[in-house]
Image (cartoon, rainbow, N blue to C red):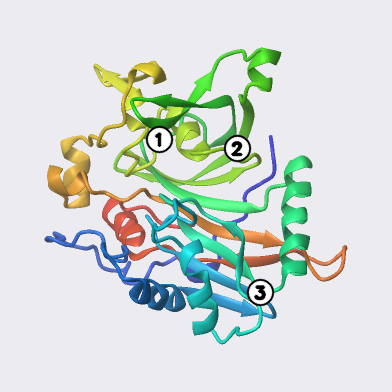
Amino acid sequence: MGPVVPEFSRHQRQPRGSRQRSGPLGDQPFPGLLPKNLSREELVDALRAAVVDRKGPLVTLNKPQGLPVTGKPGELTLFSVLPELSQSLGLREQELQVVRASGKESSGLVLLSSCPQTASRLQKYFIHARRAQRPTAIYCAVTDGIPAASEGKIQAALKLEHIDGVNLTVPVKAPSRKDILEGVKKTLSHFRVVATGSGCALVQLQPLTVFSSQLQVHMVLQLCPVLGDHMYSARVGTVLGQRFLLPAENNKPQRQVLDEALLRCLHLTPSQAAQLPLHLHLHRLLLPGTRARDTPVELLAPLPPYFSRTLQCLGLCLQ
């Protein structure tokens, strides 16, 4: 068994307002999402408000779900507004650069640095940690379904495949040396179930490798797709209450379908559930101390409001 996943910090155990069970959520069931069609100025303001920590040249953001870090020229991304964000934070001489970030569909920690030397040192640290299979990132996820084991590791060979105009991550059984040379990557994640309720689980995930959509696909392979996964959840089929994997190559991305009992627990209509955001959050990041023997520095990003509300509705408690 791999490393034990640290517990959530104390002040995260009770999400704000968690003492009262939420009622029907109305037309805005997902508080805390980034509004659509933001201007550059509005995005900069939102990111400035999302700053959770500043130490020396390092700036830590709690990135909203759905915001891409990079993109095509002309697209509104985190990277595209770094000059304005740097100015807004009073960094006139050195522009911020991205050191580590959660993906577009996930929320959570983004580590920025205004010092190129610091950024380079930390990037090397993350590379060495991956090679040593030392976890540095801790995600939390809500899954539709409960993993068969309370903790363990997920290993899978993955590749990117262009299917119907979309790049999708696809598992590869028994990859050959040729497959590895052609872009197939062996991936590994550790997981631990923190709480269960209403047929769902709150899971902590530690990726020890980096691959596009790795954590989403790993949870699909556990037959427990992440709540709000409208890309890969269709690969899990159900017959007479038993779940099984469908061939990845034959399954196009489609809106996640939740059963009626779960919709009632979440106080969602089917049309609202079709807009459910991905419940995958980069919650903690471990950085090296000043000296080699120092305890790692821990960065923390609170759960988004919609994530905390989901936990309330499902009766999931952070332990």
On the question of residue 68 being in view, the answer is yes
In which quadrant of the rendered image does the N terminus lie? top right
- Residue 145, percent from left and from top: 36, 35
- Please report the residue visible at 63 percent of the width from the left and 33 percent of the height from the top: 188
- Residue 281, percent from left and from top: 46, 54
**288 shown above or below 240:** below
Give the foreground label among 3 and 2. Answer: 3
Count neighbours of disc 2 (C-alpha within 10 A) and say few if under 14, some if 14 to 19, many if 20 or more.
many
- Please report the residue visible at 66 percent of the width from the left and 41 percent of the height from the top: 208
Residue that badge 3 annotates: 114
Count neighbours of disc 1 (C-alpha within 10 A) and say few if under 14, some if 14 to 19, many if 20 or more.
many
Where disc 3 sits, the SS reads loop
Quote the CA–CA distance across marks 2 and 1. 17 Å
- Please report the residue visible at 41 percent of the width from the left and 27 percent of the height from the top: 223
Amino acid type shown at disc 2: Ser
Res. 146 mark: 1
